[in-house]
Image (cartoon, helix red, strand yellow):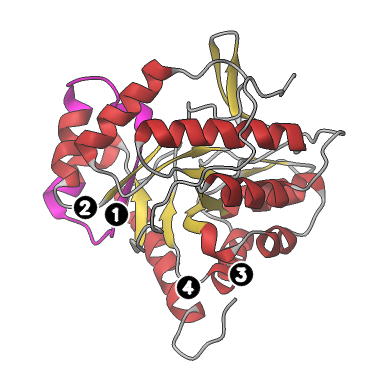
Amino acid sequence: MNIAAKSSPSMTDHRMDTGKPAFLGFGLGLRAQHYDEILGENPPIDWFEVISENYMLPGGQPLRMLDRIRQRYPVVMHGVSLSIASTAPPDFEYLRGLRDLARRVEPKWISDHLCWTGVHGKNLHDLLPIPYIREALDHVVSRVQLVQDYLGRAIVLENVSTYVQFSNSEMKEWEFLSELSRRSGCWLLFDVNNVYVSAFNHGYDPQTFLDGIPADRVVQFHMAGHSHMGTHIIDTHDHPVCEDVWDLYAAALKRFGRVSTMIERDDNIPPLDELMAEVNRTREIAGKVLAPGRKTG
């Protein structure tokens, strides 16, 4: 893939001047199966993350339900189609829909993934990796700046799970993410499960990833399950969080401190009570790791 930037970045990178988002607590990905229970019982969840694309159509039942839920809970928007690393021209129709939804929902932040998702106008519905080279970094910085200027806010970018690596990479993933955040002013969504998956698939220590990310740029954690295939792991979001990922979450708390955390489940979605148990576990682990007087960082 030719990752060359379509426009040269400025000599001095422009960082959007916005403050770091506030800590939200411990949340859950909003799924349609749980709408009625959430509205009927007001479960003790601190906030919800919504999949942006599910609500970018005008009108309809999903948007009406979201309007009601956001009156009771803080919400953040999480997209899967921004394709921030693509070399295709920016999709301003998509950006306009994203901006319109944000104006309606007033999310605490808007996030997506450091990846590309399609080519020649076709969305492949996957989060595809990029080579970690200087040329790609310049390109993504310029794309992030364009999106942030259009939306009028800093965005949040997530590390993805990967299954292949590029032989021409000039830096590590954590170095790329750190420099991207520094130069563009975007914040980082640290997906704990994705780090575990990629570390296993590529044979490195996940703690090295944690240590390579600047603590002051991380505003959110994702926690999710995966499918372990023996020789490799696939990020499927269809199982409970495994014990190794819980351990890595504790390590991430020690490194980054108090960070808004949520449970992500996209398939084999269980009853809300089961997901609430995982939300409560994030809260309990954070309480122990970040107890007053306990050293972190």
What residue is drawn where x is 60% and y is 70%?
A: 255
Q: Mark 4 points at which residue?
A: 285
Earlier in the chain: of badge 1 and badge 2, it is 1
Give me the C-alpha separation between circle 2 and circle 4: 23 Å
Amino acid found under the numbered disc labelled 4 = Ile
Mark closer to the chain start, 3 or 2: 2
Residue 253: percent from left, percent from top:
54, 70
State left or right for residue 246 relative to residue 134: left
Quarter of image, res 128 = top right
268 w.r.t. 97: above or below:
below
Q: Where is residue 297 in the image (x, y as percent from the top left)?
A: 60, 76
Q: Mark 2 points at which residue?
A: 73
Q: Residue 296: tell me if it is visible.
A: yes
Whether residues under marks 1 and 2 lie with C-beta atoms below 8 angstroms apart, the answer is yes
Residue at left offset 67%, top offset 47%: 197
Badge 3 crowding class, 10 Å Cα cut-off, few under 14, some 14 to 19, many 20 or more, is some
The magenta region covers 38-62
Number of the label disc, if any, that sits on residue 251? 3
